[in-house]
Image (cartoon, rainbow, N blue to C red):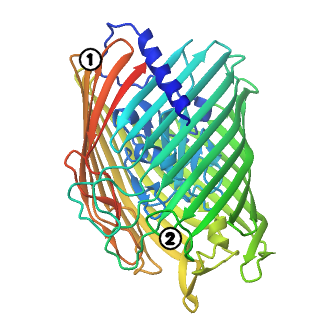
Amino acid sequence: MKPCTEVVLFLSILFLSYLCIPGWTQPLPSNDPVRVFSLGEVTVPGRRGIDSANTALSRRIEAFNRLDVGRALNLLPGVTLSNVGARNESMVYVRGFDLRQVPVFIDGIPVYVPYDGYVDLGRFTTFDLAEVNVAKGFSSVTYGPNTLGGAINLVSRRPQKRLEFDGRAGLLSGQGHRLNLNIGSNLGKFYVQGSASQLRQQTFPLSAQFVPQPQEDGGRRENAYRNDRKYSLKLGFTPNATDEYTISYINQQGTKGTPPYVGSDPKQTARFWQWPYWNKESWYFISRTALTSTSYLKVRLFYDRFRNLLSAFDDNTYSTQKKGSSFNSYYNDDTKGGSLEYGNRIVRQHNLKASFHYKQDRHRENNQGEPVRTFIDQTLSAGIEDVYTLTPKLSLVPGISYNSRRSLRAENYESATKTITPFSGNNSDALNAQTGLFYNPGNRQQLSITVARKTRFATIKDRYSYRMGAAIPNPDLKAESALHFETAYTDQLALSHPAQFLSLQASVFYSRLTDVIQQVNNVQPGIYQFQNTGKAEFYGGDASLKAQVSAAFQAGAQYSYIHRQNLSNRDLKFVDVPNHKVFVYAQAQLFRRVALVGSVEYNSARYSTSYGTQAGSFVVANTKGSVRLQQYVSLEGGVNNIFDRNYALAEGFPEPGRNFFVNLVIANL
């Protein structure tokens, strides 16, 4: 974002603050005032209402000051925040499954990078979202392919007033700031929603307990800068009460550095990497048309473009590229496709959905001075699911889908001859099936038992990457598969007053993985290859408890447990997920104008490498306070990592020590 643009955005927030009128207060709200873009939701069939164990609303995300999607998702049980330290990428695991196996969607449209199936959640800020949803294991077949472990859906906003706005201008530790503004207008048959934001930091402070290392002298973290800008615009047309048509555009522009490794593992070395640009553009159309009083057709069409540059340097001056390990690597990817969803309540007992998906991914890459290599995959999926009401309290939800992936183009670069030759083509097919039984003894109670067989196709990187000369490509990799079993219970107990309740959600699960894509060593001397040789099992449970003690005070606690075991090679460790995670929080509204939020999170130790290097356990406490100055104006601030703990999500890549933030807030929501 240019300096003049930053000034305009900041002045816009101040101008809207000036328009506000003093004298309005409210108690701690229990519902989020941000209107969810319902066309962007993908619901789990059979589930009832808002599932707080799998949904984080925008008010909660802001209450806990979660600035990017990765940290917002970490508010949910069964979800673990991780950090791919060598790439400085924010990731999450959902019950042990990574983002290749739990793809990310925006309003139901896939946004993961075509090459490797991942997406850096640190580049996705939360400022313009209405909610984030997670489906674990048993998920709707209308998501399409590759939802082996579930799906993550980022749902945008839809205005409900003639004029609504909210924004923040704030300062962060590490010479950082945030600027964001959302403006929407609903004029009846037409609406518009727009946003602009920037999240920028030069560095972040390390804990005072950090011991200086050769590549890090403490204080401010080296090469830890970020600058993420995002703009979005949505235009909607609602000709009647049942139909809706929208066009959306999203532009993300990012740049970042990768802090060097400063751990004790002799097998790890420091990388001196920077991303001069990490840019993503998306265009999409979503519509819902009522065909009859009981049927509808939903259409999604999308085009997504992703470009980035990774620059590797010789040393920590980040100025020369003379060594063999230094390079400039260019990615130029795009994705196009769409989906059709047909729904029909054929009879009172059956609510049927059928869907068809088409997606074409194109990945182009080259190092500076080399020719461009192109890879193209085409993926198709067709599925059907039904909510069959057996009795007023009991529903059966079966679903099935067929997925197909075709390799249309794959090119190999021969560095010795500097020529491009084709890889052998390959195709893969997979069948998914699931069923769930949902029992609702009361309006606020549900017991469910689900079984789901899900699959994931091997990515372009899985099949064709030489891994910087350490591996042999394997174009013939077939789909991984997982069989999930889950029992879940939800209950909300009313206390002595309508504003008081106790909410409980708990689940236990078991997942059996087969044909896991796993590294097989010494296929050639000193060279490995990825093959479908792995078998594994994941099992555990999640529990969350929320107590609304009064209209002005609520508290909650979450516990997640998981055990992951590689059955085909017990010496290989699964990485980045602790066995135990605990999250405890409390929110209070004081004097109707002051709000306080506090939270404590515990993670047990986790493996950072498959051969046993560990990141230790940690406890981190955060707090935030806000005061309403006028009707639409608030001032808020807080402290993260209050006790300045020296901890890491990945060994050798320390997280921020004690850090501060302060924001000026304007909102008429």
Q: Earlier in the sequence, mark 2 or mark 1?
A: 2
Q: Please identify, in this view, whether the residue under mark 2 or under mark 1 is nearer the observer.
A: 2
Q: Secondary structure at mark 2?
A: loop
- Quarter of the figure that contains the C terminus: top left
Q: Which mark is residue 314?
A: 2
Q: Residue at x 57, y 81 (%)?
A: 470
Position of 279 relative to 41 (above/below): below
Secondary element type, mark 1: loop
Give the labeled residue for mark 1.
593
Residue placed at 51% from the left, 17% from the top? Answer: 164
Q: Label 1 crowding class (10 Å Cα cut-off): few <14, some 14-19, many 20+?
A: some
Q: Residue 369: x and y, percent?
A: 71, 68
Query: Which quadrant would residue 495 be assigned to in this image?
Result: top left
Label 2, label 1: how many angstroms apart (C-alpha)? 54 Å
Q: Amino acid at mark 1?
A: Arg
Residue 357 appears in the figure: no
Most foreground residue, 174 or 654:
174
Q: Quadrant of residue 146?
A: bottom right
653 horizontally vs 518: left or right: left
Amino acid marked by disc 2: Asp
591 vs 533, nearest the viewer: 591
